[in-house]
Image (spheres, rainbow, N blue to C red):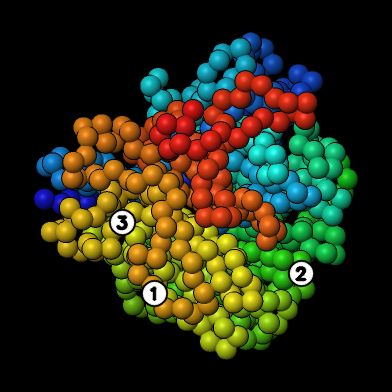
Amino acid sequence: MLKAVLKGSLAALLFSSMSYADVQSEITHSPWKDSFNVYSYLKSPTGECLTQWDGSSCGSNAYSVTQFSKRDGFNGFSFRLSWADVEIDIDQNGTNETVSKYSGNLGTYTAKHYPTAVEHNNNVYFVHSGPVVVEGLGKYGSTSGGGRSISSFKRSDGKTNALGIYVSKLNPASNKVTKPTLVHMLYKDDPHQNAVLNVDAQGYIYILIAGSAANSGSFIFRSKYPNNIDDFVDVSPATFDYSQTDPFKNNSSKPLYRGITYPKLFWVPDGYFRVIYTMHCKNRTYNTDPCNGKARNALITAELHPNGTNPIQMKNVKVLASYRGNYVVGNAKGNDIVLAFNIYLNEDVHGGSIDDRTNLYYMHSSDGGLSWQNAKNQNIQVPIQSEADYEQIVARKYFREGEPVTRKIFMKDINFTGSGANKKPMILYVGVTHNGTSIDASLTAHHYLAKSFYDGYNWSQEKISNDVDHSYSSGTLVLSDPNKNAYNVYFPQTPDHAVHGDLKNLDTSYNNALAGGAIAVMATKGSDAYQGEGHASRLTEKLIHPRVGSPDTYFAELCEFNYIRSIHNASAHSKFVAIAAGGNPYQYSDHNPLVLVNRNKTVTSALPLNITSVDSNNMTNLTRYTSCKTLK
């Protein structure tokens, strides 16, 4: 008998009203003054303690973590959200398993962080998150002793790993990669604070480490030298105060500091970075809310002007939308920027949930983000502050005010052909027609991968694949032929197309109610109709069936791929097009591989989990891909 219930009334309460922002601290003008934003024993390369709050024991402790140090291998971040669990009998043996809202290797999370990899001067620079070995201890640093934990994936000692942010350089021609450089380490285990990166016109690498929710600031680091990741300079600006920004003026008698979350970071020809991000509105602990109850978050854009080794200058902050809330994906080429997003109900005001995500919206810019238009190139009046305002940018509408949300939309990626007023965007998303459960971990809900395409005149929506089994299964669009609006869609595939609401067919489905799957690819063009599951090609090993002939060790040996992230600015001849994260989405694992997806639709290389030697250029060979669970 299938069961899918929240774990007790407390879990239901947490899910409906709690935010991971609810901690006993308030954001200040400096991200360094948040004790969770800096690991206790983080030290500069010259030995100074980088913690800046009272009571820190960093300076006197024998253990340390050296910022910008090289690390001896690649390992992603094993994570499972610690609230909103459901109980599901995955293997149909009469005993329920506890399934989280999302889990697994979140080293390349989220789909809304972009870009996480950039090609520049024939190299690929990329960021990922993972655990950090503490010097003098020989073990991963943890959140114990005063850190912030939202993960229920615990090590054998009962602790959760603290989050490390890494950057590396990959040379596709030689099939070699540098050791990862540790950019920063946080005293928390929240991968919402994963990073994005990009490169300026002089070749300096900029890394933006995201904030988290309404009271966690953001960091920005700039490489000390062009085309080099050996050393960085902290160029973080002061955390922005929204109390004097329209339309938030007069909503508070004190500063309204908020960090940059879910960042999109694009270099524009005028010589600065365009950043597009989410600002979480309400700090529940201190009851401060720039949005004044109208939205859970706001969509913001700003200019980040490089200033040498001095703090980067944040200018012309503009609110694009501040009604309900949105999850946003973006992409850019030069001055052309495209954004796609959904809308979700603000539970504080509208009685909904952040998982009531629906509708599709689109806007673009042809001048580096100075002005914004809809698909028909009509100027958009911003900020968007009502349902009526959203009508000017609708790509597809499933929900209207006062109606229930019957189809959920989870944003995955966006890409486009053309430029200026002639853009033809394609949006990638997972749709869910749910079965009454509160979250979308389910054996029977209908999950499907789909695209929305604008042909210059009209929007169309078409299914790509039924073989996804979770709303957090995240793939990417890689352009294959711009003249034909043709893409290769890489996604985590789980054969599931025969079920969708019918428990009698579970023997034919590989659905395990966990995000991820095997890496697969399917070609699609423009408004082409659904082609059928037989047109997808699986690039990694076949999944083990969770119910038919599965071993007793099924959950312990589980290894699936997710968060397949494209390489920004990859040329048409680039060998690699994406990076994907593999791991166990059911339980904690020390083994969380990162693999590379080839342009020729194969997976043959992985980032080495252990690095024992480097060449004269401080690079080491990639590991040959064998299987998700056997990579060493």
- The image shows residue 76 at horizontal and vertical percentages of 52, 36
Query: Distance of mark 1 from mark 2, alpha carbons?
Result: 33 Å
Q: Which residue is under mark 1?
A: 530
Q: Is residue 515 visible from the viewing direction of this image?
A: yes
Q: For this rendering, which residue is in front, 411 or 574?
A: 574
Cβ atoms under marks 3 and 2 closer than 8 Å: no
What residue do we see at 32% from left, 72% from top? 406
Q: Position of 296 compared to 532: left or right?
A: right
Secondary structure category for the residue under label 2 = loop
Q: Position of 225 compared to 87: left or right?
A: right
Q: For this rendering, which residue is in front, 168 or 77?
A: 168
Is label 1 or label 2 in front?
1
Is label 3 or label 2 in front?
3
Label 1: how many Cα within 10 Å (few below 14, some 14–19, many 20+): some
- The image shows residue 148 at horizontal and vertical percentages of 50, 34
Q: For this rendering, which residue is in front, 467 or 43?
A: 467
Cβ atoms under marks 3 and 1 closer than 8 Å: no
Residue 345 location, quadrant = bottom left
Residue 416, relative to residue 244: is it above or below? below
Residue 318, relative to residue 586: is it above or below? below
**Which amino acid is tagged 2?**
Asn
Q: Which residue is under mark 2?
A: 335
Q: What number is the disc on residue 62?
A: none
**Which amino acid is tagged 1?**
Tyr
Query: Distance of mark 3 from mark 1, alpha carbons?
Result: 16 Å
Label 2: how many Cα within 10 Å (few below 14, some 14–19, many 20+): some
Residue 178, relative to residue 531: is it above or below? above
- The image shows residue 607 at horizontal and vertical percentages of 57, 36
